[in-house]
């Protein structure tokens, strides 16, 4: 477990974008994916907006995915396992990098064929509590032709990251513009933020 934590932190320190190919175990990623399928079949996912609860806007020309917030109140075994893994990572991150993270929030994200999310930052103008963004992917057998890459914009070093199962990406929420490119296949992830409230 610590090996995957260290891989995420070390690659972040090296180029401002942390990547761990196996941050989630295959079993946990698969269970979360099946849970997301079930939620979608029950029509429990909602249109994703931009902004927070004080200034939320819905515009499918900017963002076209659907989301479902994870919550310990759901008492879902797989979500709880994910939360424990995140809490272990936060302890490791705080101890090794003195980041002072005090909380987190995560949601499932589902992109259907033709969906995308235009270039944006992950921090609100009226709330700076989000410090790090984390995205964990749930897509097995993802192919280049499926598109849906995460494109992170950096000076002279843009990174295009494929959303393959088990992979997690980690970066500062207020620092890097990024986008989700047009997907040609159903694309699933858990997206969230480590916070200092």
Image (spheres, grey):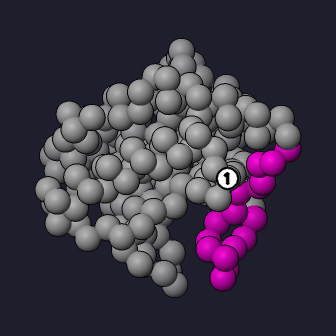
Q: Position of residue 86 (x, y in %)?
A: 39, 49
* Label 1 packing within 10 angstroms: few (<14), some (14-19), many (20+): few
Q: Which residue is located at x 76 percent, y 40 percent?
A: 39
Residues in magenta, as a range: 43-58
Q: Position of residue 144 (x, y in %)?
A: 51, 19
Q: Position of residue 172 (x, y in %)?
A: 33, 60
**In this orientation, does residue 190 appear?**
yes
Q: From the viewer's perspective, is residue 161 above or below residue 91?
A: above
The quarter of the rendered structure image containing the N terminus is top left
Q: Which residue is located at x 67 percent, y 76 percent?
A: 53
Report the front residue among 13 and 154.
13
Our reading of the magenta stretch's main secondary structure is loop
Report the front residue among 9 and 14.
9
The quarter of the rendered structure image containing the C terminus is bottom left
Under circle 1, the secondary element is: helix
Q: Which residue position holds label 1? A: 74
Residue 19 sits in quarter: top left
């Amino acid at each position: 477990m610590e090996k995957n934590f260290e891989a995420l932190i070390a690659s972040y320190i090296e180029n401002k974008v942390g990547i761990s190919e196996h941050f989630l175990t295959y079993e946990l990623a698969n269970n979360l994916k099946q849970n997301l399928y079930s939620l979608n079949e029950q029509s429990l996912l909602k249109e994703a907006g931009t902004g927070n609860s004080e200034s939320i806007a819905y515009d499918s020309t900017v963002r076209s995915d659907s989301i479902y917030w994870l919550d310990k109140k759901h008492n879902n075994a797989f979500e709880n396992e994910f939360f424990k893994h995140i809490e272990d990572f936060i302890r490791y991150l705080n101890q090794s990098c003195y980041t002072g993270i005090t909380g987190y929030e995560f949601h499932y994200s589902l992109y259907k064929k033709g969906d995308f999310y235009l270039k944006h930052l992950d921090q609100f103008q009226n709330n700076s509590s989000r410090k790090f963004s984390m995205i964990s992917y749930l897509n097995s057998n993802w192919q280049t032709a499926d598109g849906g890459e995460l494109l992170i914009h950096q000076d002279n070093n843009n990174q295009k990251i494929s959303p393959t199962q088990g992979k997690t990406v980690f970066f500062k929420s207020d620092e890097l513009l990024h986008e989700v490119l047009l997907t040609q296949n159903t694309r699933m992830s858990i997206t969230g933020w480590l916070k200092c409230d």
